Image (spheres, coloured by chain):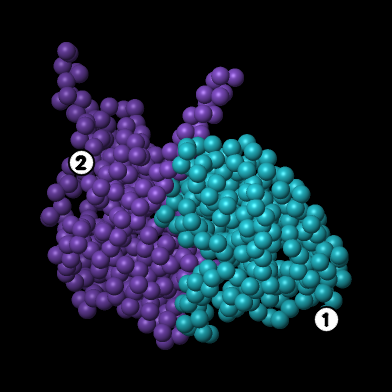
Amino acid sequence: MTAGVAGLWVVDLREVALGLGDDCLVLSHRLAEWTTHAPELEEEMALANLALDLLGQARSLLTLAGEADGRDEDHLAYWRDDRDFHNLLLVEQPNGDFAVTMTRQLLFSTFQELLYRGMAAGTEPRLAAIAAKGVMEARYHVEHARLWVQRLGGGTEESHRRMCRALDLLWPYTRELFEPTESWSRAADQGAVPPLSSLEEPWRHSIESLLADSDLEIPGFPAWQSGGRLGRHSEHLGHLLAEMQHLHRSHPNASW
Amino acid sequence: MPPTNSDESRDLAFQEAIDADRTVEPRDWMPERYRSTMVRQIAQHAHSEIIGMQPEGNWITRAPSLRRKAILLAKVQDEAGHGLYLYAAAETLGVERRELTELLITGRQKYSSIFNYPTLTWADVGAIGWLVDGAAITNQLALTKTSYGPYARAMVRICREESFHQRQGFELLSELSRGTAAQHEMAQDAVNRWWWPALMMFGPPDTESPNTAQSMAWKIKRVSNDDLRQRFVDMTVPQAQALALDLPDPQLRWNDARDHYDFGPIDWEEFRQVVSGHGACNAQRIAVRRAADEDGAWVREAARAWEGRQSSRTSAA
Protein backbone atom coordinates (compact mmCIF):
# COMPACT_ATOMS: atom_id res chain seq x y z
CA MET A 1 0.00 0.00 0.00
CA THR A 2 1.12 3.52 -0.72
CA ALA A 3 0.99 6.11 2.02
CA GLY A 4 -0.62 9.37 0.91
CA VAL A 5 -0.86 12.70 2.69
CA ALA A 6 -1.15 12.74 6.49
CA GLY A 7 -0.36 9.03 6.85
CA LEU A 8 -3.55 8.06 5.02
CA TRP A 9 -3.22 5.08 2.70
CA VAL A 10 -4.04 5.95 -0.90
CA VAL A 11 -6.44 3.02 -1.12
CA ASP A 12 -8.36 4.27 1.94
CA LEU A 13 -8.53 7.84 0.66
CA ARG A 14 -9.79 6.48 -2.65
CA GLU A 15 -12.50 4.37 -1.07
CA VAL A 16 -13.66 7.11 1.29
CA ALA A 17 -13.84 9.67 -1.52
CA LEU A 18 -15.58 7.20 -3.81
CA GLY A 19 -18.30 6.34 -1.27
CA LEU A 20 -19.03 9.98 -0.50
CA GLY A 21 -18.83 10.93 -4.19
CA ASP A 22 -21.26 8.16 -5.14
CA ASP A 23 -23.72 9.36 -2.47
CA CYS A 24 -23.70 12.78 -4.10
CA LEU A 25 -23.87 11.53 -7.68
CA VAL A 26 -26.75 9.14 -7.11
CA LEU A 27 -28.80 11.54 -4.99
CA SER A 28 -28.19 14.33 -7.50
CA HIS A 29 -29.58 12.04 -10.20
CA ARG A 30 -32.68 11.31 -8.13
CA LEU A 31 -33.29 15.02 -7.48
CA ALA A 32 -32.79 15.84 -11.16
CA GLU A 33 -35.56 13.35 -11.95
CA TRP A 34 -37.97 15.87 -10.37
CA THR A 35 -37.29 18.37 -13.18
CA THR A 36 -40.64 19.52 -14.64
CA HIS A 37 -42.57 17.45 -12.04
CA ALA A 38 -42.16 19.60 -8.91
CA PRO A 39 -45.26 20.70 -6.96
CA GLU A 40 -44.58 24.39 -7.64
CA LEU A 41 -42.13 26.53 -9.60
CA GLU A 42 -40.24 27.67 -6.54
CA GLU A 43 -39.62 24.02 -5.76
CA GLU A 44 -38.39 23.36 -9.32
CA MET A 45 -35.70 25.93 -8.57
CA ALA A 46 -34.90 24.54 -5.13
CA LEU A 47 -34.66 20.88 -6.19
CA ALA A 48 -32.43 21.83 -9.11
CA ASN A 49 -30.23 23.75 -6.66
CA LEU A 50 -29.86 20.70 -4.44
CA ALA A 51 -29.11 18.51 -7.47
CA LEU A 52 -26.50 20.99 -8.74
CA ASP A 53 -24.78 21.32 -5.36
CA LEU A 54 -24.55 17.55 -5.01
CA LEU A 55 -23.34 17.13 -8.57
CA GLY A 56 -20.57 19.64 -7.89
CA GLN A 57 -19.55 17.76 -4.73
CA ALA A 58 -19.66 14.46 -6.64
CA ARG A 59 -17.32 15.82 -9.29
CA SER A 60 -14.75 17.00 -6.72
CA LEU A 61 -14.90 13.75 -4.76
CA LEU A 62 -14.73 11.47 -7.81
CA THR A 63 -11.84 13.49 -9.21
CA LEU A 64 -10.00 12.98 -5.94
CA ALA A 65 -10.91 9.27 -5.86
CA GLY A 66 -9.61 8.72 -9.39
CA GLU A 67 -6.34 10.56 -8.92
CA ALA A 68 -4.33 7.54 -7.78
CA ASP A 69 -5.03 5.41 -10.84
CA GLY A 70 -5.55 8.16 -13.40
CA ARG A 71 -9.31 7.73 -13.88
CA ASP A 72 -11.24 10.97 -14.29
CA GLU A 73 -14.70 11.84 -12.91
CA ASP A 74 -16.48 10.66 -16.07
CA HIS A 75 -14.63 7.38 -16.15
CA LEU A 76 -15.72 6.68 -12.59
CA ALA A 77 -19.29 7.85 -13.12
CA TYR A 78 -19.96 6.13 -16.42
CA TRP A 79 -17.84 2.98 -16.55
CA ARG A 80 -18.53 1.27 -13.23
CA ASP A 81 -21.40 -1.20 -12.75
CA ASP A 82 -23.60 -1.19 -9.69
CA ARG A 83 -21.46 -3.67 -7.72
CA ASP A 84 -18.65 -1.11 -7.89
CA PHE A 85 -20.75 1.78 -6.62
CA HIS A 86 -20.26 2.53 -2.92
CA ASN A 87 -23.17 4.87 -2.17
CA LEU A 88 -25.60 4.42 0.70
CA LEU A 89 -28.80 2.53 -0.07
CA LEU A 90 -30.78 5.50 1.22
CA VAL A 91 -29.80 7.82 -1.65
CA GLU A 92 -30.71 5.38 -4.43
CA GLN A 93 -34.26 4.87 -3.17
CA PRO A 94 -36.82 6.11 -5.72
CA ASN A 95 -38.29 9.60 -5.32
CA GLY A 96 -41.79 8.38 -4.45
CA ASP A 97 -43.98 11.36 -3.60
CA PHE A 98 -42.72 14.72 -2.35
CA ALA A 99 -42.89 13.48 1.27
CA VAL A 100 -40.54 10.58 0.46
CA THR A 101 -38.12 12.90 -1.35
CA MET A 102 -38.03 15.42 1.50
CA THR A 103 -37.70 12.69 4.15
CA ARG A 104 -34.79 11.12 2.25
CA GLN A 105 -33.21 14.59 2.03
CA LEU A 106 -33.66 15.24 5.73
CA LEU A 107 -32.13 11.91 6.74
CA PHE A 108 -29.22 12.22 4.34
CA SER A 109 -28.41 15.93 4.53
CA THR A 110 -28.49 15.98 8.33
CA PHE A 111 -25.93 13.16 8.23
CA GLN A 112 -23.89 14.82 5.49
CA GLU A 113 -23.68 18.15 7.29
CA LEU A 114 -22.34 16.50 10.46
CA LEU A 115 -19.91 14.40 8.45
CA TYR A 116 -18.62 17.37 6.45
CA ARG A 117 -18.18 19.42 9.64
CA GLY A 118 -15.90 16.71 11.00
CA MET A 119 -14.08 16.22 7.73
CA ALA A 120 -13.54 19.96 7.22
CA ALA A 121 -11.51 19.92 10.44
CA GLY A 122 -9.70 16.70 9.42
CA THR A 123 -6.07 16.02 8.56
CA GLU A 124 -6.43 15.31 4.84
CA PRO A 125 -6.30 18.72 3.16
CA ARG A 126 -8.17 17.87 -0.05
CA LEU A 127 -11.02 16.11 1.74
CA ALA A 128 -11.10 19.00 4.21
CA ALA A 129 -11.36 21.56 1.39
CA ILE A 130 -14.23 19.72 -0.31
CA ALA A 131 -16.02 19.37 3.03
CA ALA A 132 -15.52 23.03 3.95
CA LYS A 133 -17.32 24.09 0.79
CA GLY A 134 -19.90 21.30 1.00
CA VAL A 135 -20.90 22.04 4.56
CA MET A 136 -22.44 25.38 3.58
CA GLU A 137 -24.48 23.65 0.91
CA ALA A 138 -25.50 20.80 3.21
CA ARG A 139 -26.64 23.38 5.78
CA TYR A 140 -29.05 24.85 3.23
CA HIS A 141 -30.26 21.38 2.19
CA VAL A 142 -31.01 20.54 5.82
CA GLU A 143 -32.91 23.81 6.33
CA HIS A 144 -34.94 23.21 3.20
CA ALA A 145 -35.83 19.64 4.14
CA ARG A 146 -36.68 20.61 7.75
CA LEU A 147 -39.06 23.30 6.59
CA TRP A 148 -40.90 20.88 4.34
CA VAL A 149 -41.03 18.09 6.91
CA GLN A 150 -42.60 20.58 9.32
CA ARG A 151 -45.09 21.80 6.77
CA LEU A 152 -46.07 18.32 5.65
CA GLY A 153 -46.10 16.82 9.14
CA GLY A 154 -48.26 19.64 10.48
CA GLY A 155 -50.13 20.50 7.27
CA THR A 156 -53.21 18.47 6.37
CA GLU A 157 -54.37 15.00 7.33
CA GLU A 158 -53.21 13.73 3.96
CA SER A 159 -49.75 15.29 4.14
CA HIS A 160 -49.32 13.93 7.68
CA ARG A 161 -50.30 10.44 6.54
CA ARG A 162 -47.84 10.64 3.64
CA MET A 163 -45.04 11.77 5.97
CA CYS A 164 -45.65 8.80 8.30
CA ARG A 165 -45.51 6.44 5.35
CA ALA A 166 -42.30 8.06 4.04
CA LEU A 167 -40.61 7.63 7.42
CA ASP A 168 -41.64 3.97 7.58
CA LEU A 169 -40.35 3.45 4.06
CA LEU A 170 -36.94 5.03 4.53
CA TRP A 171 -36.09 4.41 8.16
CA PRO A 172 -34.70 0.89 7.46
CA TYR A 173 -31.91 2.44 5.38
CA THR A 174 -30.55 4.64 8.15
CA ARG A 175 -28.48 2.04 10.00
CA GLU A 176 -25.93 1.97 7.23
CA LEU A 177 -25.13 5.66 7.68
CA PHE A 178 -23.20 4.83 10.84
CA GLU A 179 -21.51 1.58 9.79
CA PRO A 180 -17.86 2.25 8.92
CA THR A 181 -16.02 0.25 6.26
CA GLU A 182 -12.46 -0.81 7.11
CA SER A 183 -11.10 2.05 5.03
CA TRP A 184 -13.31 4.52 6.86
CA SER A 185 -12.09 3.27 10.25
CA ARG A 186 -8.45 3.60 9.21
CA ALA A 187 -9.10 7.08 7.78
CA ALA A 188 -10.81 8.01 11.05
CA ASP A 189 -7.84 6.69 13.04
CA GLN A 190 -5.63 9.06 11.03
CA GLY A 191 -7.99 11.96 11.80
CA ALA A 192 -8.99 12.47 8.15
CA VAL A 193 -12.67 11.79 8.73
CA PRO A 194 -14.84 11.71 11.85
CA PRO A 195 -15.65 8.31 13.39
CA LEU A 196 -19.19 7.54 12.22
CA SER A 197 -20.22 6.50 15.73
CA SER A 198 -19.63 10.10 16.84
CA LEU A 199 -22.26 11.35 14.38
CA GLU A 200 -25.12 9.08 15.32
CA GLU A 201 -26.20 10.79 18.55
CA PRO A 202 -26.31 14.35 17.18
CA TRP A 203 -28.01 13.07 14.00
CA ARG A 204 -30.69 11.25 15.95
CA HIS A 205 -31.23 14.19 18.26
CA SER A 206 -31.65 16.59 15.36
CA ILE A 207 -34.14 14.35 13.54
CA GLU A 208 -36.05 13.42 16.69
CA SER A 209 -36.60 16.99 17.85
CA LEU A 210 -37.77 18.09 14.42
CA LEU A 211 -40.20 15.19 14.14
CA ALA A 212 -41.55 15.92 17.62
CA ASP A 213 -42.26 19.51 16.51
CA SER A 214 -44.02 18.21 13.42
CA ASP A 215 -46.45 15.71 15.03
CA LEU A 216 -44.25 12.87 13.77
CA GLU A 217 -41.97 10.31 15.34
CA ILE A 218 -39.15 7.94 14.53
CA PRO A 219 -40.65 4.55 13.56
CA GLY A 220 -40.73 1.99 16.35
CA PHE A 221 -38.91 -0.71 14.41
CA PRO A 222 -35.14 -1.06 14.07
CA ALA A 223 -33.23 -0.03 10.93
CA TRP A 224 -31.65 -3.12 9.44
CA GLN A 225 -30.70 -2.60 5.79
CA SER A 226 -27.07 -2.15 4.80
CA GLY A 227 -24.60 -3.14 2.11
CA GLY A 228 -24.45 -0.13 -0.21
CA ARG A 229 -20.95 0.90 0.89
CA LEU A 230 -19.80 -2.62 -0.03
CA GLY A 231 -21.50 -2.64 -3.42
CA ARG A 232 -24.60 -4.64 -2.44
CA HIS A 233 -27.44 -2.43 -3.63
CA SER A 234 -31.19 -2.46 -4.05
CA GLU A 235 -32.65 -3.31 -7.47
CA HIS A 236 -33.19 0.39 -8.09
CA LEU A 237 -29.56 1.35 -8.66
CA GLY A 238 -29.12 -0.78 -11.79
CA HIS A 239 -31.95 1.05 -13.54
CA LEU A 240 -30.63 4.43 -12.48
CA LEU A 241 -27.18 3.61 -13.85
CA ALA A 242 -28.58 2.14 -17.07
CA GLU A 243 -30.21 5.48 -17.78
CA MET A 244 -27.28 7.59 -16.63
CA GLN A 245 -24.55 5.62 -18.44
CA HIS A 246 -26.21 4.51 -21.66
CA LEU A 247 -25.28 7.38 -23.97
CA HIS A 248 -21.73 7.73 -22.70
CA ARG A 249 -21.07 3.99 -23.09
CA SER A 250 -22.62 3.93 -26.58
CA HIS A 251 -19.78 6.13 -27.82
CA PRO A 252 -16.59 4.84 -26.23
CA ASN A 253 -13.62 7.19 -26.67
CA ALA A 254 -15.85 10.10 -27.71
CA SER A 255 -15.44 13.41 -25.95
CA TRP A 256 -18.43 15.59 -25.11
CA MET B 1 -68.09 64.22 -16.88
CA PRO B 2 -65.53 66.69 -18.32
CA PRO B 3 -64.36 65.85 -21.82
CA THR B 4 -60.73 65.41 -20.72
CA ASN B 5 -61.79 62.23 -18.91
CA SER B 6 -63.49 60.64 -21.88
CA ASP B 7 -62.14 57.32 -23.13
CA GLU B 8 -61.23 58.89 -26.40
CA SER B 9 -59.00 61.54 -24.89
CA ARG B 10 -57.44 59.03 -22.52
CA ASP B 11 -56.68 56.76 -25.47
CA LEU B 12 -55.17 59.73 -27.25
CA ALA B 13 -53.03 60.71 -24.28
CA PHE B 14 -51.90 57.11 -23.91
CA GLN B 15 -50.87 56.95 -27.56
CA GLU B 16 -49.03 60.27 -27.25
CA ALA B 17 -47.06 58.94 -24.29
CA ILE B 18 -46.20 55.81 -26.26
CA ASP B 19 -45.17 57.91 -29.26
CA ALA B 20 -42.89 59.92 -26.98
CA ASP B 21 -41.25 56.59 -25.98
CA ARG B 22 -42.43 56.74 -22.38
CA THR B 23 -42.77 53.30 -20.79
CA VAL B 24 -46.10 52.20 -19.37
CA GLU B 25 -45.94 51.29 -15.68
CA PRO B 26 -48.37 49.13 -13.66
CA ARG B 27 -50.16 52.09 -12.00
CA ASP B 28 -50.63 54.02 -15.24
CA TRP B 29 -54.00 54.07 -16.92
CA MET B 30 -53.99 51.90 -20.05
CA PRO B 31 -56.61 50.88 -22.61
CA GLU B 32 -58.24 47.56 -21.74
CA ARG B 33 -57.04 46.03 -25.00
CA TYR B 34 -53.46 47.05 -24.26
CA ARG B 35 -53.72 45.40 -20.86
CA SER B 36 -55.22 42.19 -22.20
CA THR B 37 -52.76 41.98 -25.09
CA MET B 38 -49.89 42.46 -22.65
CA VAL B 39 -51.25 39.85 -20.23
CA ARG B 40 -51.64 37.37 -23.05
CA GLN B 41 -48.18 37.99 -24.46
CA ILE B 42 -46.35 37.87 -21.11
CA ALA B 43 -48.29 34.80 -20.01
CA GLN B 44 -47.53 32.96 -23.24
CA HIS B 45 -43.90 33.87 -22.83
CA ALA B 46 -43.90 32.56 -19.24
CA HIS B 47 -45.66 29.35 -20.32
CA SER B 48 -43.03 28.91 -23.05
CA GLU B 49 -40.26 29.05 -20.48
CA ILE B 50 -41.99 26.44 -18.31
CA ILE B 51 -42.99 24.10 -21.13
CA GLY B 52 -39.55 24.64 -22.68
CA MET B 53 -38.01 22.90 -19.66
CA GLN B 54 -39.42 19.58 -20.88
CA PRO B 55 -37.59 18.93 -24.16
CA GLU B 56 -34.22 19.72 -22.59
CA GLY B 57 -35.07 18.24 -19.21
CA ASN B 58 -35.56 15.02 -21.18
CA TRP B 59 -31.74 14.67 -21.38
CA ILE B 60 -30.54 15.68 -17.88
CA THR B 61 -30.40 12.14 -16.48
CA ARG B 62 -28.68 10.87 -19.64
CA ALA B 63 -26.17 13.69 -20.22
CA PRO B 64 -22.94 12.10 -21.48
CA SER B 65 -20.52 13.88 -19.13
CA LEU B 66 -20.86 15.31 -15.63
CA ARG B 67 -19.80 18.74 -16.89
CA ARG B 68 -22.53 18.77 -19.54
CA LYS B 69 -25.03 17.48 -17.00
CA ALA B 70 -24.27 20.41 -14.68
CA ILE B 71 -24.57 22.93 -17.53
CA LEU B 72 -27.90 21.48 -18.68
CA LEU B 73 -29.36 21.26 -15.19
CA ALA B 74 -28.42 24.89 -14.55
CA LYS B 75 -29.94 25.92 -17.86
CA VAL B 76 -33.26 24.21 -17.21
CA GLN B 77 -33.27 25.79 -13.75
CA ASP B 78 -32.75 29.22 -15.36
CA GLU B 79 -35.85 28.58 -17.46
CA ALA B 80 -37.91 27.97 -14.33
CA GLY B 81 -36.50 31.26 -13.04
CA HIS B 82 -37.47 33.09 -16.22
CA GLY B 83 -40.96 31.64 -15.93
CA LEU B 84 -41.18 32.99 -12.39
CA TYR B 85 -40.08 36.54 -13.35
CA LEU B 86 -42.48 36.59 -16.25
CA TYR B 87 -45.45 35.41 -14.20
CA ALA B 88 -44.53 38.14 -11.72
CA ALA B 89 -44.48 40.71 -14.57
CA ALA B 90 -47.93 39.49 -15.67
CA GLU B 91 -49.18 39.81 -12.09
CA THR B 92 -48.47 43.57 -12.20
CA LEU B 93 -51.39 43.73 -14.65
CA GLY B 94 -53.87 42.35 -12.14
CA VAL B 95 -53.88 38.62 -12.93
CA GLU B 96 -52.64 35.78 -10.75
CA ARG B 97 -50.14 33.04 -11.59
CA ARG B 98 -52.74 30.45 -10.58
CA GLU B 99 -55.23 31.69 -13.21
CA LEU B 100 -52.55 31.67 -15.89
CA THR B 101 -51.49 28.14 -14.97
CA GLU B 102 -55.12 27.03 -15.31
CA LEU B 103 -55.29 28.63 -18.75
CA LEU B 104 -52.13 26.76 -19.77
CA ILE B 105 -53.10 23.31 -18.54
CA THR B 106 -56.59 23.55 -19.97
CA GLY B 107 -55.14 24.53 -23.35
CA ARG B 108 -56.77 27.98 -23.39
CA GLN B 109 -53.47 29.85 -23.57
CA LYS B 110 -50.63 28.94 -25.88
CA TYR B 111 -46.89 28.66 -25.57
CA SER B 112 -44.19 28.71 -28.22
CA SER B 113 -44.92 25.95 -30.71
CA ILE B 114 -41.26 25.02 -31.00
CA PHE B 115 -41.51 23.00 -27.79
CA ASN B 116 -43.95 20.60 -29.42
CA TYR B 117 -41.07 19.01 -31.29
CA PRO B 118 -39.33 16.07 -29.58
CA THR B 119 -35.67 15.94 -28.48
CA LEU B 120 -34.54 12.66 -30.03
CA THR B 121 -30.81 12.72 -29.40
CA TRP B 122 -28.28 14.49 -27.20
CA ALA B 123 -27.43 16.78 -30.14
CA ASP B 124 -30.96 18.21 -29.89
CA VAL B 125 -29.90 19.84 -26.63
CA GLY B 126 -27.19 21.67 -28.56
CA ALA B 127 -29.52 22.54 -31.45
CA ILE B 128 -32.08 23.99 -29.04
CA GLY B 129 -29.40 26.10 -27.36
CA TRP B 130 -27.94 27.35 -30.60
CA LEU B 131 -31.02 27.76 -32.84
CA VAL B 132 -34.04 28.01 -30.53
CA ASP B 133 -32.33 30.21 -27.95
CA GLY B 134 -30.72 32.14 -30.81
CA ALA B 135 -34.15 32.84 -32.29
CA ALA B 136 -35.56 33.65 -28.85
CA ILE B 137 -32.78 36.19 -28.22
CA THR B 138 -33.40 37.86 -31.57
CA ASN B 139 -37.02 38.25 -30.55
CA GLN B 140 -36.31 39.27 -26.99
CA LEU B 141 -33.62 41.83 -27.75
CA ALA B 142 -36.33 43.70 -29.65
CA LEU B 143 -38.60 43.29 -26.60
CA THR B 144 -36.12 44.97 -24.23
CA LYS B 145 -37.54 48.19 -25.73
CA THR B 146 -41.17 47.15 -25.52
CA SER B 147 -43.54 49.76 -24.07
CA TYR B 148 -44.59 47.91 -20.90
CA GLY B 149 -41.89 48.63 -18.29
CA PRO B 150 -41.94 45.45 -16.17
CA TYR B 151 -41.85 43.26 -19.29
CA ALA B 152 -39.02 45.26 -20.88
CA ARG B 153 -36.95 45.02 -17.68
CA ALA B 154 -37.57 41.27 -17.37
CA MET B 155 -36.35 40.93 -20.97
CA VAL B 156 -33.05 42.66 -20.22
CA ARG B 157 -32.26 40.16 -17.49
CA ILE B 158 -33.52 37.14 -19.44
CA CYS B 159 -31.55 38.11 -22.58
CA ARG B 160 -28.31 38.10 -20.63
CA GLU B 161 -28.88 34.52 -19.49
CA GLU B 162 -30.18 33.41 -22.88
CA SER B 163 -27.03 34.59 -24.66
CA PHE B 164 -25.05 32.46 -22.27
CA HIS B 165 -27.25 29.46 -23.09
CA GLN B 166 -26.89 30.09 -26.79
CA ARG B 167 -23.09 30.03 -26.55
CA GLN B 168 -23.26 26.80 -24.55
CA GLY B 169 -25.47 25.20 -27.23
CA PHE B 170 -23.07 26.33 -29.94
CA GLU B 171 -20.13 24.91 -28.01
CA LEU B 172 -21.93 21.58 -27.44
CA LEU B 173 -22.60 21.23 -31.16
CA SER B 174 -19.09 22.30 -32.01
CA GLU B 175 -17.70 19.49 -29.85
CA LEU B 176 -20.00 17.00 -31.61
CA SER B 177 -19.28 18.33 -35.07
CA ARG B 178 -15.52 17.97 -34.53
CA GLY B 179 -15.95 14.62 -32.73
CA THR B 180 -16.41 11.10 -34.09
CA ALA B 181 -18.30 10.43 -37.33
CA ALA B 182 -21.33 9.29 -35.31
CA GLN B 183 -21.25 12.49 -33.24
CA HIS B 184 -20.99 14.67 -36.34
CA GLU B 185 -23.92 12.86 -37.90
CA MET B 186 -25.95 13.29 -34.70
CA ALA B 187 -25.28 17.06 -34.80
CA GLN B 188 -26.20 17.38 -38.49
CA ASP B 189 -29.41 15.41 -37.99
CA ALA B 190 -30.44 17.67 -35.11
CA VAL B 191 -29.79 20.83 -37.14
CA ASN B 192 -31.78 19.36 -40.05
CA ARG B 193 -34.75 18.83 -37.76
CA TRP B 194 -34.60 22.15 -35.81
CA TRP B 195 -33.73 24.69 -38.53
CA TRP B 196 -37.18 25.19 -40.08
CA PRO B 197 -39.11 25.10 -36.80
CA ALA B 198 -36.66 27.75 -35.49
CA LEU B 199 -37.52 30.01 -38.45
CA MET B 200 -41.22 29.53 -37.67
CA MET B 201 -40.66 30.87 -34.15
CA PHE B 202 -40.94 34.44 -35.47
CA GLY B 203 -44.55 33.82 -36.40
CA PRO B 204 -46.47 34.10 -39.67
CA PRO B 205 -45.31 36.44 -42.45
CA ASP B 206 -46.14 40.11 -41.86
CA THR B 207 -48.82 40.00 -44.55
CA GLU B 208 -50.72 37.39 -42.53
CA SER B 209 -50.02 38.56 -39.00
CA PRO B 210 -53.28 40.01 -37.67
CA ASN B 211 -51.98 41.55 -34.43
CA THR B 212 -48.91 43.20 -35.82
CA ALA B 213 -50.26 46.66 -36.74
CA GLN B 214 -51.84 47.46 -33.35
CA SER B 215 -48.91 45.96 -31.44
CA MET B 216 -46.49 48.06 -33.47
CA ALA B 217 -48.54 51.22 -32.80
CA TRP B 218 -48.46 50.49 -29.07
CA LYS B 219 -44.77 49.64 -29.33
CA ILE B 220 -45.41 46.28 -27.73
CA LYS B 221 -43.78 44.91 -30.83
CA ARG B 222 -40.92 47.00 -32.20
CA VAL B 223 -39.76 44.93 -35.16
CA SER B 224 -41.91 42.88 -37.55
CA ASN B 225 -41.88 39.07 -37.77
CA ASP B 226 -40.21 38.98 -41.16
CA ASP B 227 -37.53 41.51 -40.19
CA LEU B 228 -36.68 39.52 -37.06
CA ARG B 229 -36.56 36.30 -39.07
CA GLN B 230 -34.14 37.90 -41.53
CA ARG B 231 -31.91 39.14 -38.70
CA PHE B 232 -31.80 35.61 -37.30
CA VAL B 233 -30.90 34.04 -40.65
CA ASP B 234 -28.17 36.62 -41.28
CA MET B 235 -26.69 36.02 -37.85
CA THR B 236 -26.91 32.21 -37.99
CA VAL B 237 -25.54 31.30 -41.42
CA PRO B 238 -21.92 32.26 -40.60
CA GLN B 239 -22.23 30.39 -37.28
CA ALA B 240 -23.27 27.23 -39.14
CA GLN B 241 -20.19 27.61 -41.32
CA ALA B 242 -18.03 27.90 -38.22
CA LEU B 243 -19.63 24.71 -36.91
CA ALA B 244 -19.01 22.87 -40.20
CA LEU B 245 -22.70 21.95 -40.28
CA ASP B 246 -25.09 22.44 -43.21
CA LEU B 247 -28.40 24.26 -42.95
CA PRO B 248 -31.07 22.21 -44.74
CA ASP B 249 -32.08 24.81 -47.31
CA PRO B 250 -30.74 24.56 -50.91
CA GLN B 251 -31.95 28.10 -51.63
CA LEU B 252 -29.95 29.70 -48.86
CA ARG B 253 -27.44 32.14 -50.39
CA TRP B 254 -26.05 35.63 -49.89
CA ASN B 255 -27.81 38.33 -51.91
CA ASP B 256 -25.53 41.31 -52.55
CA ALA B 257 -28.35 43.51 -53.78
CA ARG B 258 -30.42 43.03 -50.62
CA ASP B 259 -27.40 42.81 -48.33
CA HIS B 260 -29.08 39.80 -46.69
CA TYR B 261 -29.25 36.05 -47.06
CA ASP B 262 -32.10 34.74 -49.23
CA PHE B 263 -33.78 31.63 -47.94
CA GLY B 264 -36.34 29.12 -49.20
CA PRO B 265 -40.09 29.06 -48.52
CA ILE B 266 -41.29 28.05 -45.05
CA ASP B 267 -43.87 25.26 -44.78
CA TRP B 268 -46.60 27.30 -43.07
CA GLU B 269 -48.98 24.36 -43.21
CA GLU B 270 -46.70 22.51 -40.78
CA PHE B 271 -46.70 25.60 -38.55
CA ARG B 272 -50.52 25.78 -38.55
CA GLN B 273 -50.79 22.08 -37.74
CA VAL B 274 -48.40 22.32 -34.78
CA VAL B 275 -49.96 25.54 -33.45
CA SER B 276 -53.41 24.01 -33.62
CA GLY B 277 -52.38 21.05 -31.49
CA HIS B 278 -51.18 18.43 -33.95
CA GLY B 279 -47.44 18.53 -33.29
CA ALA B 280 -45.54 15.47 -32.06
CA CYS B 281 -45.60 16.52 -28.40
CA ASN B 282 -48.51 18.96 -27.84
CA ALA B 283 -50.58 16.52 -25.80
CA GLN B 284 -47.56 15.17 -23.93
CA ARG B 285 -46.26 18.62 -22.90
CA ILE B 286 -49.60 19.66 -21.44
CA ALA B 287 -50.14 16.27 -19.79
CA VAL B 288 -46.81 16.56 -17.96
CA ARG B 289 -47.62 20.09 -16.78
CA ARG B 290 -51.10 19.07 -15.68
CA ALA B 291 -49.81 15.97 -13.84
CA ALA B 292 -47.21 18.07 -11.98
CA ASP B 293 -49.96 20.49 -10.98
CA GLU B 294 -52.36 17.77 -9.84
CA ASP B 295 -49.72 15.65 -8.09
CA GLY B 296 -48.46 18.73 -6.27
CA ALA B 297 -51.89 19.91 -5.10
CA TRP B 298 -51.67 18.13 -1.72
CA VAL B 299 -48.20 19.64 -1.11
CA ARG B 300 -49.37 23.19 -1.81
CA GLU B 301 -52.45 22.62 0.30
CA ALA B 302 -50.35 21.33 3.21
CA ALA B 303 -48.09 24.38 2.96
CA ARG B 304 -51.11 26.72 3.03
CA ALA B 305 -52.67 24.91 5.98
CA TRP B 306 -49.41 25.00 7.92
CA GLU B 307 -48.79 28.68 7.18
CA GLY B 308 -52.36 29.48 8.18
CA ARG B 309 -51.82 27.75 11.50
CA GLN B 310 -48.46 29.53 12.04
CA SER B 311 -49.98 32.97 11.46
CA SER B 312 -52.97 32.25 13.72
CA ARG B 313 -50.49 31.08 16.40
CA THR B 314 -48.51 34.31 15.96
CA SER B 315 -51.59 36.50 16.19
CA ALA B 316 -52.86 34.57 19.26
CA ALA B 317 -49.50 35.03 21.00
Question: Which residue shows up at 73% across the image and 56% down it?
Answer: A115
Question: Can you say which quadrant of the picture contains the N terminus of chain B?
Answer: top left
Extreme residue in the front direction: A221
The cyan-tinted chain is A
- Give the percent coordinates (x, y) of residue B271: 19, 62
Q: Residues within 10 Å of mark 1 (few under 14, many from 20)?
A: few
Callout 2 amino acid: Ala
Q: Nearer the viewer, residue B272 or B252?
A: B272
- Give the percent coordinates (x, y) of residue B209: 15, 52
Q: Residue A41 — which label?
A: none
Question: Which residue shows up at 20% across the image and 58% down it?
Answer: B277
Extreme residue in the top direction: B1
The quarter of the displayed image where residue A70 is located:
bottom right
Q: Determine whether, in the image, residue A226 is placed left or right of residue B197.
A: right
Q: Is residue B186 visible?
A: yes
- Give the percent coordinates (x, y) of residue B190: 34, 74
Question: Which residue shows up at 47% across the image and 38% down it?
Answer: A157
Residue that label 1 marks: A1
Q: Compared to B230, does B3 lie above or below? A: above
